[in-house]
């Protein structure tokens, strides 16, 4: 019983470190890399937080595997719970996405110092940054919610859980890309509004001379 309590505390600690670190990383990237140009100090903080998230994932994997084994010993039909397998797939995606962020996205961010991520990025980089960030957010949030929704256990199918995950990711990415596109259109509109046509400038100059 004491060991089971230890595993639950370990699992909660991993969740707090991983999910909390991921949320704070998103906050730093939005406030210090999207709304304002990315500074070297912000990137250093993001890299430090990525290590915290990594250790959170390690704790989740170790404690989660032990808790699942314990649940199987006390409930022979535990592995028939499709919600459990959906959560496992989401955590696998989260882990793979973490490796991708560490080895690809952060290196791409290093080349974007003094630029605003998303807004000043080319389209491929824009899609890459939006997708990885939102996959991380959804893959942390949805398993957390499912973990508290015991009424879904042994009731809803695996495909439904993964469909919800996919819809959330695609909708979030589409929303971010739409906001960036609207921001770009608004910026161009404002730029045109501040420039008077050449013939209007000539007419104004002639009026002054007259």
Image (cartoon, rainbow, N blue to C red):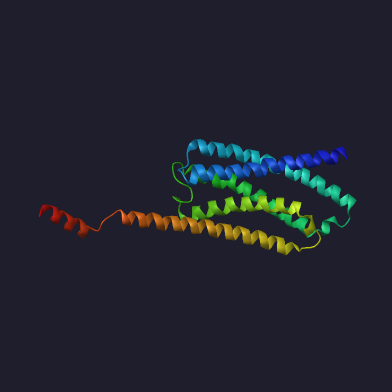
Which residue is at 83% across, 40% downward?
5
Which residue is at 85% across, 47% downward?
70
How many marks do you count on the picture?
0
Q: Is residue 59 visible?
A: yes
Q: Is residue 58 visible?
A: no
Q: Quadrant of the C terminus?
A: bottom left
> Relative to residue 197, is residue 114 drawn left or right?
right
Depicted 105 relative to depicted 52: above or below: below
Residue 105 vs residue 80, the one in the foreground = 80
Q: Quadrant of the N terminus?
A: top right
Residue 198 percent coordinates (x, y): 22, 58
> Relative to residue 168, is residue 122 drawn left or right?
left
Which residue is at 42% across, 56% downward?
184
Which residue is at 56% across, 44% downward?
27
Query: Where on the picture, by quarter, is residue 196?
Result: bottom left
Residue 126 percent coordinates (x, y): 50, 53
Depicted 193 relative to depicted 117: above or below: below
Residue 154 percent coordinates (x, y): 81, 60
Work out which residue is located at the far left of the displayed protein and give it.
Answer: 210
Residue 9 vs residue 203, the one in the foreground = 203
Residue 132 percent coordinates (x, y): 58, 51
Residue 104 vs residue 195, the one in the foreground = 195
């Amino acid at each position: 019983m004491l060991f089971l309590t230890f595993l639950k505390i370990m699992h909660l600690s991993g969740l707090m470190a991983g999910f909390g670190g991921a949320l704070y990383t998103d906050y730093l990237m939005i406030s210090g890399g999207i709304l304002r140009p990315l500074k070297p100090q912000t990137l250093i903080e993001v890299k430090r937080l990525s290590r915290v998230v990594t250790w959170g994932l390690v704790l989740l994997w170790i404690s989660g595997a032990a808790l699942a084994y314990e649940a199987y010993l006390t409930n022979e039909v535990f592995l028939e719970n499709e919600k459990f397998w959906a959560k496992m797939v989401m955590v696998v995606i989260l882990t793979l996405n973490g490796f991708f962020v560490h080895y690809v996205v952060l290196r791409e961010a290093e080349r974007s110092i003094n630029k605003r991520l998303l807004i000043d990025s080319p389209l491929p980089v824009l899609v890459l940054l939006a997708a990885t960030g939102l996959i991380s957010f959804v893959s942390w949030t949805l398993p957390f919610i499912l973990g508290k929704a015991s009424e879904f256990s042994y009731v809803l199918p695996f495909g439904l859980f993964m469909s919800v995950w996919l819809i959330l990711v695609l909708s979030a990415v589409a929303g971010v890309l739409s906001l960036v596109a609207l921001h770009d259109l608004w910026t161009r509109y404002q730029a045109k509004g501040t420039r008077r046509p050449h013939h209007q400038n000539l007419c104004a100059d002639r009026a002054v001379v007259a």
